[in-house]
Amino acid sequence: MTATSRPPATDGMVWIPGATFMMGSDHHYPEEAPAHEVTTGGFWIDPCPVTNAQFARFVRKTGHVTMAERAPDPADYPGARPELLVPFSAVFIAPPHRVSLADPHNWWTPVPGADWQHPQGPGSSIRSKPDHPVVHVAWADAAAYADWAGKAIPTEAEWELAARGGLDGAEFAWGDEFNPGGEWMANTWQGEFPLHDAGEDGYRGTSPAGAYPANGYGLFDMIGNVWEWTSDWYTGYATPAPACCTGATAGRGASPEHSIDPHDPARIPRKVIKGGSHLCAANYCRRYRPAARMAEPVDTSTSHLGLRLVLR
Ligand SMILES: [Ca+2]
Ligand SMILES: [Cu+2]
């Protein structure tokens, strides 16, 4: 942390009035069900995800070094392959031929030297992308940025309320039709994932923040472009909250311990991420919807995950 100037807290932010709304969905993936009523207080939210230019300013002012730029400590990853104990981040690389969709390792590659300034790995840069969302930020990087900005990472309920744009119960952030009037409303993937992105929406990979129409609250890129971190520890909505936390909203009140994937040998706790990304495709991952959610280990950074901030 430094004492240097911070952006004025509500500069350009949008006020989301507190509300009771239906969170989740009964019509898609099991982790979104059951739809349930949630109440959240009012808050300010940034209209766009944090951009490369904004993150660069944070790094200049604070000297922050992201997780992806540091070598993992072998003590935290017993049995890890030595090639993964160097600084790396996960980059989407389209396979050269059709692969099993059951194994994300077929397109996610740990690339040494991939980080927020080199989103595709060494040799790539963000020079032409100052207005694109920052990517390759792990949870600790997102939290450090929020601290510096004097803001916070949204809860899942805040994020979903904001993404719905006042259209309670709608499929998408803009209504019930994916391409209303033939218009592209978000940066997703067209064509057969993970082989070929036809880019019919105008972009392959990330797009500049604000390139698609805003939702009903005036928020851009809530859906598609990049996933966004939320502050909630992951749990299934159908999983009963631990006894310590009864009274908490369904899906909330999970602990780091409860969020861990039982198959993960490193036992890394997981946060909820929201919004889907430019990699979401009809044939593989229809998560370009406000209700959609995924669990992301806190140590993980990828080429399709960024953040946006709120102020309470
Ligand atoms: Ca696209
Ligand atoms: Cu997806």
Image (cartoon, grey):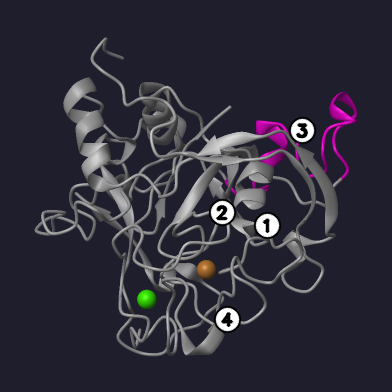
User: Measured from the top left, where is residue 185 in percent x and y?
Assistant: 47, 74
User: Measured from the top left, where is residue 186 in percent x and y?
Assistant: 45, 71
Q: Which residue is mark 3?
A: 253
Q: Label 3 vs label 4: CA separation? A: 33 Å
The picture quadrant where one finds residue 119 is bottom left
Against 285, is 253 above or below?
above
Q: Which residue is mark 1?
A: 166
Residue at 67% across, 34% down? 42
Quick one: label 2 or label 3, which is nearer the N terminus?
2
Residue at 46% across, 37% down? 139
Label 4 crowding class (10 Å Cα cut-off): few <14, some 14-19, many 20+?
A: some
Residue at 23% across, 52% down? 114
Against 241, is 96 above or below?
below
Q: Is mark 2 within 8 Å of ligand 2?
A: no
Residue stretch in magenta: 240-264
Quick one: label 2 or label 1, which is nearer the N terminus?
1
The majority secondary structure of the magenta stretch comes to loop
The picture quadrant where one finds residue 196 is bottom left
